Image (spheres, grey):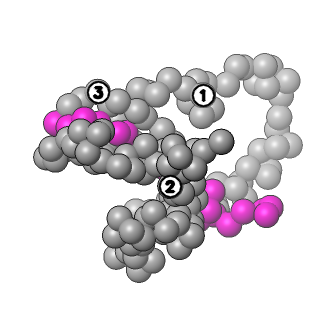
């Protein structure tokens, strides 16, 4: 549905690591937290496999997770609104020479995955989901593939070999 609300459009950078102490990541993505929460809630509510494995979704978790907005953020928002009113008058002073200056490399989401400004490093979430755990053999974990690939199996069990055609 368009237009999207601001809380639905925000993206955060998430790095999946083998261990949190490592500098490099195994996978780095920009994700929309609202979509991740919707998908998790859908999987838990519609999948018998997730229920059997004891996986639950706490909708109140996000209320406890959201950080408090600092005064600096409020000041930046006020400054932005003032800058926007000033930019209306600056549109009248537009010149063709300035328009030909190429855009910077940070103006796109297509920048390299390791590119982060120093002030943005605190906004990158580093996650090591299996750190401190012991791996289980794929032969002992009956539903490992179904749980590892929710986008393919949609939280459903794969039929047994005797039930396949």
Residue 76: percent from the left, percent from the top?
A: 50, 59
Badge 1 or badge 3: first in the primary sequence: 3
Residue situated in front as seen by the camera: 33 or 71: 33
Badge 2 or badge 3: first in the primary sequence: 3
Q: Is residue 13 magenta?
A: yes
Q: Quadrant of residue 18?
A: top left
Residue at image point 62% right, 62% down = 8
Residue at image point 39% right, 68% down = 52
Element type where label 1 sits in the image: loop
Residue where numbered disc 2 is placed: 157
Element type where label 2 sits in the image: loop
How much space separates mark 1 and mark 2, taking CA atoms?
Answer: 36 Å
The answer, for residue 100, to whether it is visible in the render is yes
Q: Is residue 159 magenta?
A: no
How much space separates mark 2 and mark 3, taking CA atoms?
Answer: 34 Å
Residue 121: percent from the left, percent from the top?
A: 34, 40
Element type where label 3 sits in the image: loop
Residue where numbered disc 1 is placed: 110
User: How dense is the environment of label 3, judged by Cα within 10 Å: few (below 14), some, or many (20 and up)?
Assistant: some
The residues colored magenta run 1-21
Q: Which mark is residue 24?
A: 3
Residue 24: percent from the left, percent from the top?
A: 29, 27
Q: Quick check: 80 above or below 48?
A: above
Q: Say left or right for 32 vs 128.
A: right
Q: Nearer the viewer, mark 1 or mark 3?
A: 3
Q: Quadrant of the C terminus?
A: top right
Q: Quadrant of the N terminus?
A: bottom right
Q: Say left or right for 159 vs 71.
A: right
The answer, for residue 13, to whether it is visible in the render is no
Q: Quick check: 7 above or below 134?
A: below
Residue 97: percent from the left, percent from the top?
A: 80, 20
Q: Quick check: 144 above or below 60?
A: above
């Amino acid at each position: 549905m368009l237009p999207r609300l601001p809380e639905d459009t925000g993206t955060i950078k998430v790095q999946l690591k083998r261990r949190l102490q490592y500098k490099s990541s195994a996978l780095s993505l920009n994700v929309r937290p609202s979509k991740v929460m919707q998908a998790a809630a859908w999987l838990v509510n519609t999948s018998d496999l997730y229920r059997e494995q004891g996986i639950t979704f706490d909708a109140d978790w996000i209320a406890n997770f959201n950080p408090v907005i600092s005064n600096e953020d409020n000041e930046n928002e006020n400054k932005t609104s003032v800058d926007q009113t000033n930019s209306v008058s600056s549109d009248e002073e537009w010149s063709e020479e300035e328009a030909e200056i190429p855009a910077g490399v940070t103006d796109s989401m297509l920048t390299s995955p390791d590119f982060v400004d120093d002030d943005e490093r605190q906004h990158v979430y580093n996650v090591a989901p299996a750190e401190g755990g012991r791996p289980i053999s794929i032969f002992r974990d009956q539903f490992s593939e179904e749980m590892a690939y929710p986008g393919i199996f949609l939280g459903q069990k794969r039929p047994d070999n005797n039930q396949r055609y």
